[in-house]
Amino acid sequence: MRPVIEVSAIRKTYGRTVAVDEASFTVNEGEIFGLIGPNGAGKTTTMECVEGIRKPDRGAISVLGLDPFRQVYKLQERIGVQLQQAQLQKRIKVWEAVDLWASLYRKQKVNAEGLLEQLGLADKRGAWFMNLSGGQKQRLFIALALINDPEVVFLDELTTGLDPQARRAIWDLVWGMRLQGKTVFLTTHLMEEAERLCDRVAIIEHGRIIDIDAPERLVARHCSERTVILDTPDTTAEERFKTIRRVESVDHAGLRFTIRGRGDDLVTDVIQCLSESRIRVTDFRTILPNLEDVFLKLTGRSIRE
Amino acid sequence: MLRGLWKLTWIEIKVFMREPMGAFGSIVVPVALFVLLSRFAKNRLSPPSLAVSSFSHEGVPVLVSILIAVSTVLSLVTIISIYREGGILKRLRATPLRPQTILTAHVAVKLLLSAATLVLMFLAGKRYLPPGNHSSLFSFTIALLITTWSISSIGFLIASIVPTARFAQPIGAVILYPMVGLSGLFVPVDLLPPGFQAVAKALPFTYAVRLLQGIWNGDGWWNHASDVAALALVFLVCTALSAKVFRWE
C-alpha cells in the first residue's frame, strides 16, 4: 500500500497551549483513516496542518508527495475538504455553491447535477443555504468536497449534531468514497462512528497520538476483558463458573450472574461449562469491549467527559 | 489568480440583493436622504441665500456621496467579519481560490453598489441639480469609486482588528465618522485650528472631499492628481498593513 499522507513529528502551539505534540502517522492509499479523541484533543489542528490551512511549528508533512503549506494550491486541486462548523453565505443557493466550487478547479470531471442527485440534494438545488437542515448542509459540504473528484477527502467531525438516521446516510456516502478508490482521512469523537467506518484509527489526546491500529486490533491489544451475564435459578452454578479458566470474578444478585474474565475463549468456555453441567439459563448475553473502553484504558478517562 | 472572481462577485451581488435590509439601507436611504436634503435646501429655507444655494449645489451631493462611501465601507467591514465569524472565509480559503480574489470580489460588489446608488441618486434628484453640470456626472462617479476603493482598504484594516461581527459596525463608525468630520466637508480645512489641520492633512477623507468637490465643480482631473495619488497611497499602505494583520478565522 502506497502512503498518501505522511506526518512526522509535527508540533503546533497557540501561546502556551500545545495543540499538537510530536504527532506522527501515515495514511495509506484507499483506506479510511480516523483521528479519534475528545473535543480539544488536537484533531482539527492536526487535520488542518495536513490540509495546508495551518503551518505546524515544526515537523514534516507530505500529502500526495506535496508539501501542504508551500504547495497548497497544487494540493488543493487534488484534495477535497469538509471543515468542522463551516458555513456558507446564508442566502446562497445550493446550485450556486456547487457551480462556484466547480469553477474553482482546473480539472472538471464531476457532473455537478449527478453529484447533487447522488447526495439526495437534487430537489433542494434552488434552496438557500440558511434554509437547509443540518443533514442537508453536511451533504452539501460533502458535495463541495467531492466536486473536483479528489484523491484524498478530509472530513472533520462530519456527523456531529446529526440525528442517527442522517448519520447513517452519511456513513454510506463515506463507504461509497472508498469504493471509488479515494483515501479518506476523518476525525470524530464518536467511537461508534470510528469503529464502523475506519480501517485504522489513531487515538489522540492532549495533542499526542497514543496508539494507531485497526479498531479491532486496538481492542484486542488493550482490552482483553470479556463479560458474560446470564440468569439461572441453579444455586450450584457459582462454584462451577469459578472453575472456568481465566475467570476473574463471578458476582450474582438474585438469579443474575456476572462472569468477568479475559481472552477470546471466555465466552466459549462459559457455554461449554453450562452445557456440561446442564445448567438451565433463562437469559444470556455478552459484553465485549469496544474502542470506548480502549480509550478509557489508555487515557484514564471517558471520551464523553 | 482571477479564477472564480467573476462567479464569486456575481454570487455576492445576488446574495446581497436577497437580503432585504441590506439593499434597502445601502441604496434607498442615501437616495432618499439626497432628495430630502435637496428639497429642504431649496424650498424650506427662504429667502434662498447664496450660502443655501451653494450648499444645495455642491454641499449636498458631496455630503451624500461621502456617506455612500462610508456606508459602503462599513458594510464591507461588517460582511467580512460576519464571513470570518461564520467560517465562510475559511471555507473559501480551503479551495484553490486565492485570498486576494475573495477580497477583490467583495470590493467589486461594493463599488458596483456605490455606483448604482449614485446613479439612482442622480436620477431621483435630477431637478435639484444645477443645470448644465451633467457632463461631469460620469467623472464624479469615477471620483466616488476611487474614494470608496481607497477607503475600503481602511475597511480591511478595521476588519482585521474587530473582535467579533457584533462590534464591526460600531467600531468602524467610531473610526470613520470623525475622519469625515475633519475632512473639510463641514468646515473648510483652512479654518480649522492648526493642530486639527495637521491631522486633517493625514486623513484620506480630506483628499476624498477635495477631489469630489473639485470634480463636482467641473475641475479637470489633472488639478486633482495629488488627491488621487494620496488616495492611492492610502490604499497601498492600508492594504500592505492588513495583509500582515488580517485574520481569516
Image: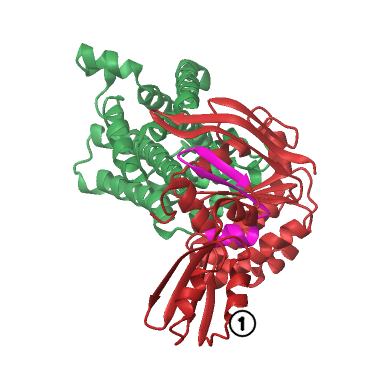
Chain colours: A red, B green
Judging depth in this view, the residue of A226 and A212 nearest the camera is A226
Q: Is residue B224 visible?
A: yes
A81 over A234 or under it: above or below: above
In the rendered image, residue A208 lying in the magenta stretch gets the answer yes
For the point 53% across and 25% down, the residue is A57
B89 over A124 or under it: above or below: above
Query: What is the magenta range?
Result: A191-212
**Residue beneath disc 1:** A275
User: Mark 1 belongs to which subunit?
Assistant: A
For the point 38% across and 41% down, the residue is B71
Which picture quadrant has residue B162? top left
Task: Specify the quadrant that holds the N terminus of chain B.
Answer: top right
Q: Amino acid at mark 1?
A: Ser
Judging depth in this view, the residue of B173 and A265 nearest the camera is A265
**Image x and y of residue A74, in percent:** 72, 35
Which picture quadrant has residue B75? top left
Q: Is residue A93 visible?
A: no
Count numbered badges in the picture.
1
Q: Is residue A105 left or right of residue A56?
A: right
A150 over B77 or under it: above or below: below
**Image x and y of residue A8, in percent:** 63, 30
For the point 44% across and 26% down, the residue is B245
Which picture quadrant has residue B156? top left
Mark 1 Cα shell of 10 Å, populated few (<14), some (14-19), many (≥20): few
SS assignment at label 1: helix
**Image x and y of residue B132, in percent:** 46, 37
In the rendered image, residue B246 lying in the magenta stretch gets the answer no
**Image x and y of residue A287, in percent:** 52, 69
Judging depth in this view, the residue of A201 and A266 nearest the camera is A266
